[in-house]
Image (cartoon, rainbow, N blue to C red):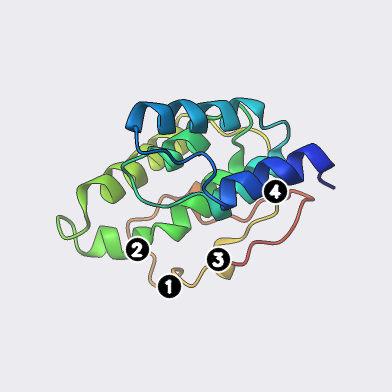
Amino acid sequence: MLTPAQQERLQSLHAYEWADDDPETTTQNLDTIFKEIETEEELWYASFIVPWGFADGSLHRILNHKLCERGIALFLYWALDPISCHRNEGASPLPIAALITEIEGRFDQGHFDTEHIAFSPLDSPNYHADHTGIPTPLLAPTTGQIGRAHV
C-alpha cells in the first residue's frame, strides 16, 4: 500500500511536473523524484508512468535504482519486446537493443536477487512460444507478492 507521500510523488511524475524547458533542470527534477522513491512497489508504479523515451534516461533510472528487483527488471525487459529484437538483430533501435542486452547481462551476473513484484513473462503480450535467444532466467516468473503485471 502506497503512502500519501508516495501517491503524491507518483502523481507528480505522471503529470510531468518534473519537466522543464531547461534539460539540466529536467534531469535534476527526475533525479530528485527517483532518489525519494521509498519502496519496490513505488518504483514498480513509476516504471509504468515514466515516459519511455530514451532521451531523459528514465528507464535507466529505474534499472539502476537501488530498489530495482527481479520483477521490475523482467517487466522492463519484456515490455521492450526482446523476442522481436533477437529475431531482427540490427533492426531494433539501438537504445532498445542496448537496454535489452544490458538487462540480460545483469541477470546473467545475478544482479537481481530479490523478488517483491509478481511478474510472469507469460503475461506479456511480447511473449511468444518461440522464445529463441531469450536467456532461461528471463523466462521464469517471479515469486513476488506485490501486484500482477499487466503490460
Picture residue at 30% right of the left edge, 50% below the top: 96
Where residue 108 appears, as percent x and y from the top left, is 44, 35
Residue 16 lies left or right of residue 82; in this view the side is right
Instruction: Check disc 3 and report the residue beneath it.
Output: 151
Q: Residue 128 carries which label?
A: 1
Picture residue at 83% right of the left edge, 42% below the top: 4
Q: In which quarter of the image is residue 121?
A: bottom right
Specify the quadrant that holds the C terminus: bottom right
Q: Which of 34 and 91 is in front in this view?
A: 34
Picture residue at 64% right of the left edge, 56% below the top: 119
Q: Earlier in the sequence, mark 4 or mark 1?
A: 4
Q: Earlier in the sequence, mark 2 or mark 1?
A: 2
Instruction: Check disc 4 and report the residue beneath it.
Output: 117
Residue 12 lies left or right of residue 77; in this view the side is right
SS at mark 4 in the image:
loop
Asked if labels 1 and 2 touch by Cβ distance under 8 angstroms, the answer is: yes
State whether residue 13 is above or below residue 124: above
Label 4 or label 3, whichever lies nearer to me, is 3
Question: Is residue 44 something that shows in the picture?
Answer: no
Where residue 107 appears, as percent x and y from the top left, is 48, 37
Amino acid type, residue under disc 1 in the picture: His
Spatial separation of the CA atoms under disc 4 and disc 2: 22 Å
Count of all numbered marks drawn on residues in the image: 4
